[in-house]
Image (cartoon, helix red, strand yellow):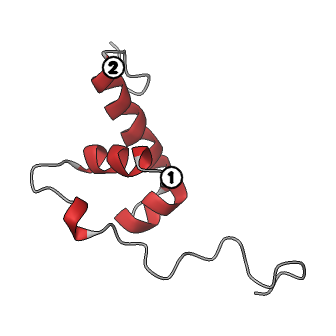
Amino acid sequence: MLVAYAGKDPFEPPVDVSEPKYLRRASDTRPERAYRMFRNGKDTFYIALAMKTKEVNVLRWITAERCKRLGLDNPYSVKE
């Protein structure tokens, strides 16, 4: 789909959305990888495409990892 003012759909994914293999560590969990990609400047839409998941999952992973590293309560954790 072409957009009149730019000539390109702004929501079209980049050609290669995979995370570079040199950034991957075998011991990393998906939340750790998502948080590292976010800290490296990737947006949540891009991270979701690269990890083949929904953007809402990426947002939760980033929030959970950030809270863990800063010693804060996770707003998504189940409280009884």
Q: Which residue is mark 1?
A: 44
Count of marks overlaid on the render: 2
Identified by mark 2, the residue type is Leu
Q: Position of residue 71 (x, y in %)?
A: 30, 15
For the point 17% across and 49% down, which residue is it? 28
Work out which quarter of the rendered image holds the N terminus and state it: bottom right
Image vertical order of residue 13 relative to residue 2, above or below: above
Identified by mark 1, the residue type is Thr
Work out which quarter of the rendered image holds the C terminus and state it: top left
Q: Nearer the viewer, residue 48 or 24?
A: 24
Callout 1: 10 Å neighbours few (<14), some, many (20+)?
A: many
Q: Quadrant of residue 8?
A: bottom right
For the point 28% across and 50% down, which residue is it? 33
Callout 2: 10 Å neighbours few (<14), some, many (20+)?
A: few
Label 1, label 2: how far apart the Cα atoms are: 20 Å
Q: Is residue 52 visible?
A: no
Residue 70 lies left or right of residue 41; in this view the side is: left
Q: Position of residue 29 (x, y in %)?
A: 20, 48
For the point 56% across and 75% down, which residue is it? 13
Q: Quadrant of residue 7?
A: bottom right
For the point 36% across and 72% down, which residue is it? 18
Q: Which residue is mark 2?
A: 70
Q: Position of residue 47 (x, y in %)?
A: 43, 58
- Disc 1 is placed on an element classified as helix
Q: Which mark is residue 63?
A: none
